[in-house]
Image (spheres, helix red, strand yellow):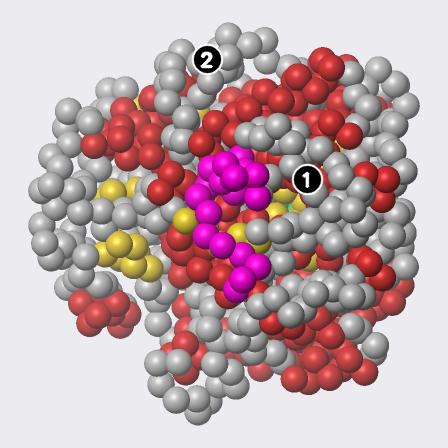
């Protein structure tokens, strides 16, 4: 990955001079990977999740909950614990299953991933929650006293004007120059403060994040935030807040940490070929906002209730390094492009070369680096991919390490990754690292992390099965990408999961012959579709294997694809319930209908299916409104707290009670029937798994799985 490589980072003024150098070598590295590995075929489905915890210190005496800045010592401990488990075991299989812990941007954050990616096979899906619980359990048991790891998307009192970090620091750091967040909150590895500083320097001002305030009964109108130290005079940029960066009726934030200090749930899938990766990437693009809304868990920022439920725009603005010229506020003079979006945002174009990917769907303004684009075309890269890469390459590299300037472009991907890994989009198309066995992968990045591993597993299992359904049934989710962006905004609105309407494609089935196939929709008895069972399942699937089974390529199937229908007529606005659970009038099966149809096409024992359906049932119920999102639950909790004054303010005590409640819900000692099914067993009551339990649940076969290097 190379992201955490040690070295001396260049200051922005020097890094800027080397931007073209990094880009041109980055393109060479991409081309080298592409040409070496474009024909890599038949890679099995492997996939994995990433879960980010906030480490929180609970102080009963003062009734406060603070973010604990002990990432380094905690990671050191976790890594020595996992090393010990691995060293104590004779079995290479057990060794491979030991989970991994990583640092994240916030010095109070820990990320965990499974030791090896999960493989294909339905039974393996039942190990996901076990795996997640094991990771949480290891973390829990090796934290300092009174610390808890909570999977919380945003910390309600981050950046308030009273202590919210332990240890406490004043916000006077030179990297962020924030009025609210000290630099000590940032992961001390030099890459991270440099990233924060260079974003600020490139932009020519601090980032300006404005989240609409939630107007409650006693919230003053207009809402002018009196807690902002408008008159501080430590840095020149201190005057930005009073000069318009802080908007009335909004919660103002001014540092990268407000966004990158949020946690999320990400999933990475390996495809069996580069084309399959394109297919999965494209199909998941319209799904990203839907899942953002359904997982929404972030309604409070800097001690105020917001009128949004999710983090996306916050994190997007938190790393927005575009200049005024690039943002279109003044005419272009020094900069090259008008850039409509932050480097953290939704994707702007689809990747597939299939005829199905109509030009009309790629209707976003797509500034591209022309030199890069021409170079890629000259090297025979297909147009959609060339546009995608050339779009990523309008950005400057933000952190350049002196020691890494000279690389062998045949064996390194560091310059490419420098640009790629600071384009934080809803989907990421991940080429194989050079000289590895890893295949082409797609990362799904929109979801907010859930409070419990039951929920995190449920969302992971659902998306994995959805990708399998997409490939098996050759589903078509294409819609104009500008409407996907409209959905991204809808998804973040307060109560979007219940009240929002989202554009989605009406007919998702491929045009093939007329063989009828019964879809076991959660809402409908059956749905007539044009899908051909035999084609869809590669001649009948009789093994519980989730690798792509498509037998024919979509191109030939779609040669006579009807392009007369206008893209706008192909979609309609639907509620969350309709998109997930299907429409009453049988015209749309719902994503869950597709997942169920896929599940039933597999020859798996009833018991396994029942276990999987527990997760799917939960997603169905969240989508139907039977269960609320965590965002809704948090908002209700705060608003009904005895200390709440109806003025949108979340106090230190409310935050403490909230964190206690969140921890109790996760442990299963506090029941919240609006949030979780009665069958939910918290970590206090469940025997927490050990690595060997995990191994037993993964497989009885002692042979170690293939581990990608
Ligand atoms: P990043 O932070 O760059 O997105 P991480 O290494 O933190 O990446 O997480 C990558 C995820 O991908 C992990 O869950 C891991 O298990 C999974 N993974 C690793 N190798 C593969 C692979 N070959 N195919 C699919 N997923 C993989
Ligand atoms: Mg990661
Ligand atoms: Mg990350
Ligand atoms: Mg990462
Ligand atoms: Mg992460
Ligand atoms: Mg990731």
Crowd rating for badge 2 (residues with CA inside 10 Å; few <14, some 14–19, many 20+): few
Residue 61 shown in magenta: no
421 or 125, which lies in front? Answer: 125
Secondary structure state at the residue bearing disc 1: loop
Q: Which residue is mark 1?
A: 528
Q: Residue at x 41, y 56 (%)?
A: 489
Q: Nearer the viewer, mark 2 or mark 1?
A: 1
Q: Quadrant of the C terminus?
A: top right
Q: Quadrant of residue 242?
A: bottom left
Q: Which residues are magenta?
A: 568-587
Q: Estimate the x, y position of residue 159 in percent, counting from the top left.
A: 29, 47
In the image: residue 257, left or right of residue 239? right
Q: Which residue is mark 2?
A: 678
Residue 641 disc label? none
In the image: residue 327, left or right of residue 522? left
Residue 514 seen anywhere in this rendered image of the structure: yes
First of labels 2, 1 by sequence position: 1
Q: Residue furthest bottom?
A: 333
The vertical placement of 119 against 436, above or below, is above
Q: Residue at x 54, y 62 (%)?
A: 569
Residue 573 shown in magenta: yes
Crowd rating for badge 1 (residues with CA inside 10 Å; few <14, some 14–19, many 20+): some
What's the CA distance linking mark 2 and mark 1? 35 Å
């Amino acid at each position: 990955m190379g992201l955490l490589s040690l070295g001396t980072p260049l200051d922005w003024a020097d890094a800027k001079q080397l931007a073209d150098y990094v880009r041109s070598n980055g393109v060479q590295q991409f081309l080298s990977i592409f040409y070496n590995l474009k024909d890599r075929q038949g890679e099995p489905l492997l996939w994995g999740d990433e879960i980010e915890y906030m480490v929180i210190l609970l102080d009963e005496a003062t009734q406060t909950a603070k973010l604990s800045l002990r990432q380094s010592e905690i990671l050191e401990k976790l890594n020595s614990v996992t090393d010990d488990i691995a060293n104590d075991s004779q079995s290479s299989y057990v060794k491979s299953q030991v989970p991994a812990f990583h640092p994240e941007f916030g010095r109070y954050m820990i990320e965990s991933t499974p030791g090896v990616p999960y493989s294909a096979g339905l039974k393996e899906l039942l190990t996901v929650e076990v795996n997640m619980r094991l990771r949480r359990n290891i973390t829990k048991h090796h934290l300092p006293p009174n610390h808890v790891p909570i999977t919380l998307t945003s910390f309600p009192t981050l950046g308030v004007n009273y202590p919210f970090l332990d240890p406490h620091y004043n916000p006077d750091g030179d990297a962020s120059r924030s009025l609210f967040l000290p630099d000590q909150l940032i992961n001390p590895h030099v890459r991270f403060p440099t990233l924060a500083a260079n974003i600020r320097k490139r932009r020519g001002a601090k980032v300006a994040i404005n989240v609409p305030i939630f107007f409650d009964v006693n919230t003053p109108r207009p809402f002018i935030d009196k807690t902002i130290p408008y008159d501080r005079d430590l840095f020149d940029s201190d005057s930005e807040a009073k000069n318009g960066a802080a908007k009335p009726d909004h919660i103002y934030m001014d540092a990268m940490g407000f966004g990158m200090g949020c946690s999320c749930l990400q999933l990475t899938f390996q495809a069996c070929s580069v084309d399959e990766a394109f297919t999965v990437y494209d199909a998941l693009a319209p799904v990203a906002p839907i899942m953002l809304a359904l997982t929404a868990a972030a309604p409070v920022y800097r001690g105020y209730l917001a009128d949004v439920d999710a983090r996306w725009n916050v994190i997007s603005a938190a790393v927005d390094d575009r200049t005024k010229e690039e943002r279109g506020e003044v005419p272009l003079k020094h900069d090259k492009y008008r850039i409509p979006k932050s480097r953290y945002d939704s994707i702007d174009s689809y990747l597939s070369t299939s005829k199905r990917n109509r030009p009309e769907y790629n209707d976003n303004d797509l500034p591209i680096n022309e030199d890069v684009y021409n170079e890629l075309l000259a090297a025979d890269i297909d147009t959609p991919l060339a546009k995608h890469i050339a779009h990523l390459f309008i950005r400057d590299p933000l952190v350049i390490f002196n020691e890494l300037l000279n690389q062998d472009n045949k064996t390194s991907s560091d310059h490419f990754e420098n640009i790629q890994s600071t384009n934080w989009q809803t989907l990421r198309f991940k080429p194989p690292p050079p000289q590895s066995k890893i295949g082409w992968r797609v990362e799904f990045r929109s979801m907010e992390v859930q409070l419990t591993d039951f929920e995190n597993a449920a969302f992971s299992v659902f998306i994995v099965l959805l990708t399998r359904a997409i490939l098996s049934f050759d589903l078509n989710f294409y819609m104009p990408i500008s409407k996907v962006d409209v959905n991204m905004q809808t998804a973040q609105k307060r109560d979007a999961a219940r009240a929002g309407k989202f554009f989605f494609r009406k007919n998702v089935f491929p045009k093939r012959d007329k063989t009828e196939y019964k879809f076991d929709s959660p809402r409908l008895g059956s749905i007539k579709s044009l899908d051909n069972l035999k084609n869809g399942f590669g001649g009948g699937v009789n093994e519980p294997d989730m690798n792509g089974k498509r037998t024919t390529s979509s191109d030939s199937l779609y040669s006579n694809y009807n392009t007369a229908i206008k893209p706008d007529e192909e979609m309609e606005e639907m509620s969350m319930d309709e998109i997930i659970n299907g429409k009453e009038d049988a015209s749309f099966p719902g994503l869950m209908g597709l997942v169920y149809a896929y599940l039933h096409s597999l020859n798996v024992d009833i018991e396994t299916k029942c276990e999987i359906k527990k997760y799917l049932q939960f997603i169905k119920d969240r989508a139907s409104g039977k269960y609320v999102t965590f965002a809704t639950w948090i908002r209700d909790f705060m608003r009904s707290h005895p200390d709440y004054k109806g003025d949108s303010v979340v106090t230190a005590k409310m935050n403490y009670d909230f964190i206690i409640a969140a921890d109790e819900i996760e442990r299963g000692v506090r029941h919240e029937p609006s949030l979780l099914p009665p069958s939910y067993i918290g970590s206090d009551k469940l025997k927490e798994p050990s690595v060997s339990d995990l191994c037993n649940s993964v497989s009885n076969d002692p042979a170690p799985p293939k581990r990608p290097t």
